[in-house]
Amino acid sequence: MNKLKILFLILFISGSVLSQSNKNIFNKSLFALSYINSSEHNGLDTYWNIENGFGGYFQTQFYLGDISVGISHTSFKGVKTKYPDFSSNYIYVSWIGEINLPLNSSLGAGIKVGSYLMTFEDDTLSSFQKNESELAVGPYAIFSLPVFSRFSINISGEFITVFTKRSMKFFNLSAGISYSFTTPNWLRRVFE
């Protein structure tokens, strides 16, 4: 299965390299907002129920593929009072390679790397203990379909591994909307 994931990523990287040869760096950008349905895959649900979340990101063209910065928020409710509720904010950077499909749609795959910040709602903990930050990494894929002028509908899936003492593994399925625009000159100068 891991070999299939690696092959999938290589195909998208190759497609991105070929499709990017005439692309202007930082020429096009987008903002996106999404609704997130998250599920956990290694027993965390024994202690907490995961609530649906939301996220947003900014993306722009890069030398090969696109890069983005984003944040996603999810809340966790303890199944018993001894397990404190907590919220998470995944702040990340990502790289994605995309291929163009019919109807101006696109399919992309990439990787996200960031900090998974957890804030526990427990007054018996010190302020230091209430906040935890761990490295998080994972592959993701996205399908985008333009629906009106500069607006597109996006559907994405991602696997996230959070490197706590016992790694937490999540699968997020997201649906949302993005707005594309020509990157203003002042912002291009910041990137360059």
Image (cartoon, grey):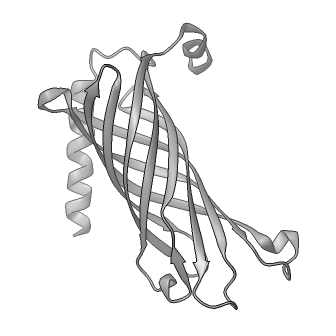
Q: Residue at x 47, y 41 (%)?
A: 33
Q: In the drawing, does residue 119 fall left or right of residue 56?
A: right
Residue at the far front: name it: 148
Q: As rendered, which of 175 and 3 lies closer to the eye? A: 175
Residue 147 position, x and y percent, is 26, 29
**Picture mark count:** 0
Q: As rendered, which of 164 and 57 lies closer to the eye? A: 57
Q: Residue at x 32, y 42 (%)?
A: 154
User: From where the camera sits, is residue 167 visible?
Assistant: no
Location of residue 29 with respect to 92 vertically, above or below: above
Q: As rendered, which of 126 and 13 lies closer to the eye? A: 126
Q: As rendered, which of 182 and 81 lies closer to the eye? A: 81
Q: In the drawing, does residue 37 fall left or right of residue 133?
A: left
The image quarter containing residue 104 is: top left
Q: Residue at x 21, y 35 (%)?
A: 15
Q: In the drawing, does residue 71 fall left or right of residue 143?
A: right
Residue 50 position, x and y percent, is 50, 73
User: From where the camera sits, is residue 117 visible?
Assistant: yes
Q: Residue at x 14, y 28 (%)?
A: 103
Residue at the far left: name it: 102
Quadrant the C terminus occupies: top right
Residue 79 position, x and y percent, is 57, 87
Q: In the drawing, does residue 1 fall left or right of residue 155?
A: left
Location of residue 24 with respect to 43 vertically, above or below: above
Residue 21 position, x and y percent, is 27, 19
Quadrant the N terminus occupies: bottom left
